[in-house]
Image: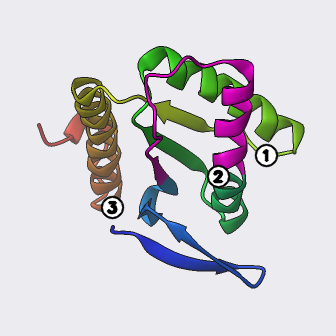
Amino acid sequence: MPMKKEQYNDTIFDIDVYIPEYSVGFECKVFEDAFAPMTAPRVNSVVNDVQKQVQRYYDFGIQHVVLVTNLVQSSSKTVEKALKKKLSENGYPESLEVIHKDIKYLLEWLDEKADKISKLLAEDFVKSIGLKNQEKIE
């Protein structure tokens, strides 16, 4: 689903990508210098930049947030750890993933998620038509 504007407590905010059936929201962030060293002040700056937006996703009822960035892998892992800690300190869930800039990794990650969704849909289909496990359609 494309970007969506939502309102929560009289505040309008953007959800970059929202998949309501699975309660997943994607926040996409592009940082000016994706290759700069991830010093403590920079980590704090990046976390402060995205924390409020991610918290709004949770406030809206989204259960899993994916932050897609142009950061290198090591930087994205550092940001993910710091952001999860900050969210936890503020009483928010840590169901967050930070995806780094490697397109191959992003495609593999999306493929893995699509496979899980496909399996869930197949299970739901089997339940909806009342088949038992041994009767499943191959």
Q: Give the residue drawn at x 29%, y 37%.
A: 110
Q: Amino acid at mark 1?
A: Tyr
- Single out the mark in the foreground, 1 or 3: 1
Residue drawn at (63%, 59%) of the image: 57
Residue 119 in the image: above or below residue 74: below
Taking 130 as reference, is 3 left or right? Answer: right
Q: Which residues are magenta?
A: 26-51
User: Which structural element holds mark 3?
Assistant: helix
Identify whether 52 is placed above or below 98. Answer: below
Residue at x-position 60% and y-position 58%: 62
Q: Are marks 1 and 2 in contact (CB under 8 Å)?
A: yes
Give how far across and how far down residue 104 sits, in percent.
21, 25
Circle 3 residue: 128
Q: What mark, if any, has residue 92 been given in the picture?
A: 1
Residue of label 2: 54
Amino acid at circle 3:
Ser
Please state if 93 lies on the left or on the right of 67 as rendered: right
For label 3, count other residues whose C-alpha is less than 10 Å away and answer few (under 14), some (14-19) or many (20+): few
Badge 1: residue crowd in 10 Å (few <14, some 14–19, many ≥20): some
Q: Earlier in the sequence, mark 1 or mark 3?
A: 1
Q: Between marks 3 and 2, how big is the CA–CA gap?
A: 35 Å
Callouts 1 and 3 close, C-beta under 8 Å: no
Q: Quadrant of residue 109?
A: top left
- Disc sitting over residue 21 in the figure: none
